[in-house]
Amino acid sequence: MPGRHKQDLVQKMIAAQSELQRYLILHKAKGYMADSDSAQLREILFGLCSTLREQFPLFRSILTQEEVMAFQEGTGALTTAALCLMGGKHDCPRFVAVDTAKLEQNLKIVQRATGYLTRNHTVQDA
């Protein structure tokens, strides 16, 4: 059963990664994002990070040290991305100015972590 928890959380990380990537694409195309869009993504990311931290102990024992580090790096990057989405309402309260470079950097970390975790499924995960 711990392997199932791992797979579920990796899939949730991949979904969050896709949401963050979509947000960045829209932000680059429009040049801004509405506060509601940023708030929605922020809540998704914080919710997932909370879930990851709660459920991680359930399957940590079946992970290699590298997988533990990948989960920790991915969770940290998602948390940092969520924090980036908290500020930026100083000039106009309806739109958020975010540090897209920082979001992109964290997206790359999440992509690397999920890539590593999806490549390293073992028989124990099934």
Image: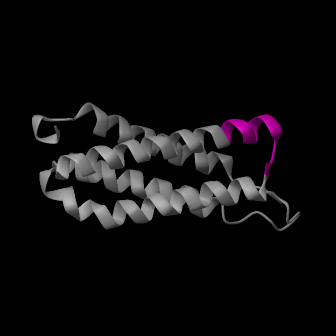
Q: In which quadrant of the rendered view does residue 122 lie?
A: top left
Q: How many numbered discs?
A: 0
Q: Residue at x 27, y 31 (%)?
A: 119
Q: Is residue 51 above or below residue 10?
A: below
Is residue 9 visible in the rendered structure shown here?
yes
Decide if residue 26 is on the left or right side of residue 80: right
Q: Quadrant of residue 36?
A: bottom right
Horizontal arrangement in the rendering, residue 57 relative to residue 80 (left or right): left
Q: Residue furthest right?
A: 92
- Of residue 35 and residue 76, the one placed in the foreground of this image is 35
Q: In percent of the image, x 81 and y 42: which residue is there?
A: 31
Q: Is residue 98 visible?
A: no
Across and down, in percent, residue 43 comes to 58, 61
20 in magenta: no
Q: Where residue 72 appears, x then y in whole percent? A: 33, 56
In the image: residue 95, left or right of residue 18 = right
Q: Position of residue 92 (x, y in %)?
A: 88, 63
Q: What is the span of residues highlighted in magenta in the rendered image?
A: 24-33
Q: Residue furthest front?
A: 1
Query: Dividing the image into 4 quarters, which one contains the C terminus?
Result: top left
Looking at the image, which residue is at 40% across and 51% down? 74
38 to 83, vertically: above or below: above
Give the main secondary structure of the magenta stretch. Answer: helix
- Outermost residue on the top side: it is 119
Q: Is residue 120 above or below residue 2?
A: above
Drawn side of residue 19 relative to residue 28, left or right = left
**Point 63% across, 38% down: residue:** 22
